[in-house]
Image: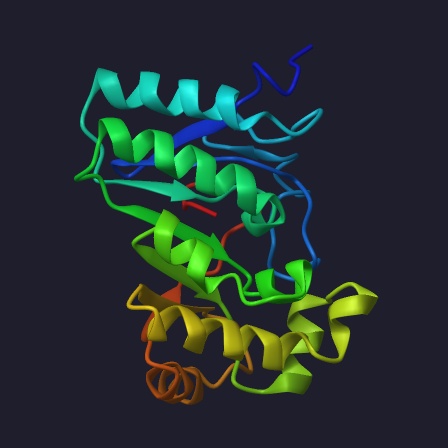
Amino acid sequence: MKTAEVADVAYEYDDGLYLNLTNRCPTACTFCVKKQWSWRYRGWDLKLSGEPSAAAVSEVAVSRLSRRPFRELVFCGYGESTYRLPELVEISRRVRREYPELPIRLNTIGLGDMIWKCDISPDLARAVDAVSVSLNTADPAQWKRLHRPAAEFREEGFAAALRFTARCAARGLHVTVTAVDLPGVDLWAVTDLALKLGAEFRVRPRLENSVPDIAP
């Protein structure tokens, strides 16, 4: 049985190297496939038995990067990476020492400021080049229905995600707001909101439960 130190803390997709830091998440999104796919993705097992150390993830990342070129490094798994902000920063620092030209991105639900009860954009600006925020709607009531946030994030979560997005953009990060193509979601409204926040917009296809062929 795998331990956190030898689990699939890194996985590959479409010329990107993805780092899986945690399975903790502040939301239980209706469109998330981690349970339907048994925490697996394209042969990778993303179900951690414990959270890996920054040193362990750094070693795996640097080892993988030494084998072949990757287009980017992405903090993304079946969990919210900003729960482990200090580790994310430490890993990024190690990778940048050895691969200074490699772009680094964070995929997030946008609740990092609420998790840490402060503005984390200064830390992210030192650690990553780009941030992708899974917002999925411009309607706060629909945000609650789609994301099913934990109680402590329910009332302020949508507004917090908007502030987080704007703060990251103001720091000069390349910010993209994304939305899964779901029935009832006004994608034009999300596009308009993203632009007002200083971000770009991208539609993500809805994942099929049966064939895990798109990156989470």
Give the x, y percent position of residue 76. 48, 44
Visual colour scheme? rainbow
- As rendered, which of 124 and 27 lies closer to the eye? 124
With respect to residue 93, does 167 lie above or below? below
Is any atom of residue 212 visible in this view?
no
Residue at x-position 59% and y-position 43%? 84
- As rendered, which of 189 and 68 lies closer to the eye? 68
Give the x, y percent position of residue 110. 54, 65
With respect to residue 99, does 167 lie above or below? below
Asked where in the image residue 42 lies, by quadrant, the reply is top left
Q: Is residue 149 left or right of residue 9?
A: right
With respect to residue 1, does 134 lie above or below? below
Give the x, y percent position of residue 112. 59, 60
The N terminus, quarter of image: top right
Farthest top residue? 1
Q: Is residue 177 left or right of residue 20?
A: left
Is any atom of residue 25 visible in this view?
yes
Residue at x-position 26% and y-position 30%? 97
Q: Is residue 212 left or right of residue 198?
A: right
- As rendered, which of 84 and 18 lies closer to the eye? 84
Asked where in the image residue 66 lies, by quadrant, the reply is top left
Give the x, y percent position of residue 118. 61, 66
Residue at x-position 35% and y-position 75%? 170
